[in-house]
Image (cartoon, rainbow, N blue to C red):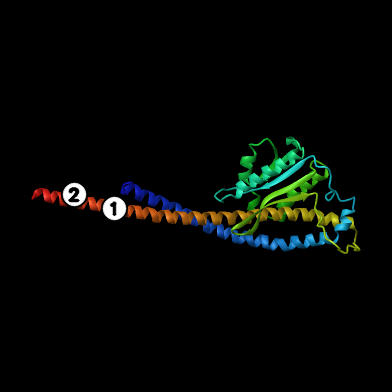
Amino acid sequence: MANLKEIRTRISSVKSTMQITSAMKMVSAAKLRKAQQSITQLRPYADKINEILVNISESLSNSNDNPYVKERKIEKILLIVISSNRGLCGAFNSNIIKKTLSEIDKYKEMQIADENIHLLGFGKKAYEILSKQKYKIIDKDFKIFDELTYANAFEYSSRIMEMFKNKEYDRVELIYNGFKNAATQILTVEQLLPVKIPEVDNFNSDYIIEPSLDGISGTLVPKSITIQLLKAIMDSNASEHGARMIAMHKATDNATELVRDLKLTYNKARQASITNEILEIVGGAEALK
């Protein structure tokens, strides 16, 4: 059995760790509330754009002028991987990395060459692992989570749309953790480009479009792409704080249980020590008789 000083040192160390994890839990909870509010406010806007796309879906499908909606043979792929900048959030980042490698394997089975699979990384953790792979990373951004705005998302979406329009890529996908609630993150893979027009059955698409279909789609489709990218980043941001809050909550509970077990061990050791001292005193007294 460990001596009393060692046990006291361990108890003090675990208590210090427990204070840190408890503080991190509260910080994550505060950040989660703000992130959850942001993604909740964005979703109705994204849903309304999606509804308008449904309304003009047949017209868009028949349009030859919009370069972002036409499917073509897949030869070059861009995967946009969204992770976090910091760890201590459970399996949040490892799940993203595993899913990315799974998607890469899927395209390799479709005979896509390694040099034609490129990555764009938001968040440091996935970049640190994926940068050691043989796939080209065209860009990375670790600061976008500091200011999640439409303008910052548009900076990347416009660049991605330009590359897709110039046929540098034939498909662009988003890989991120979708936010459901603080305890649940949904690992999500979404096609960003070409734009997937929602399919509906028996929908009346006989619309008169003013000023023109090209004018509407030329504004609506790029906006939809930017909103989809922004929504994915905001989803991932909220999911990260939720995952970290739960991880720190579990760590705090484990530390509390460990302190309780160590105190029990300490009391047993102390009791044994006192008993030994009493036996020594009694033995000494008996020896003097």
Image check: 140 left or right of 253? right
Give the mark nearest the N terminus, 1 or 2: 1
Residue closest to the eye, 116 or 40: 116
Image check: 276 left or right of 253? left
For label 2, the SS is helix
* Percent position of residue 1, x then y: 33, 46
Residue for point 47% across, 53% down: 20
| 153 versus 40 height, above or below | above
Residue for point 73% across, 36% down: 114
The residue type indicated by label 2 comes to: Glu
The residue type indicated by label 1 comes to: Arg
Residue 10 visible in the shown view: yes
Residue annotated with mark 2: 280
Residue for point 54% across, 57% down: 27
Residue for point 84% across, 47% down: 71
Residue annotated with mark 1: 270
Residue 168 badge: none
| 150 versus 97 height, above or below | below
* Percent position of residue 228, x then y: 74, 54
Q: CA distance from mark 1 to mark 2?
A: 15 Å
* Percent position of residue 108, x then y: 73, 39
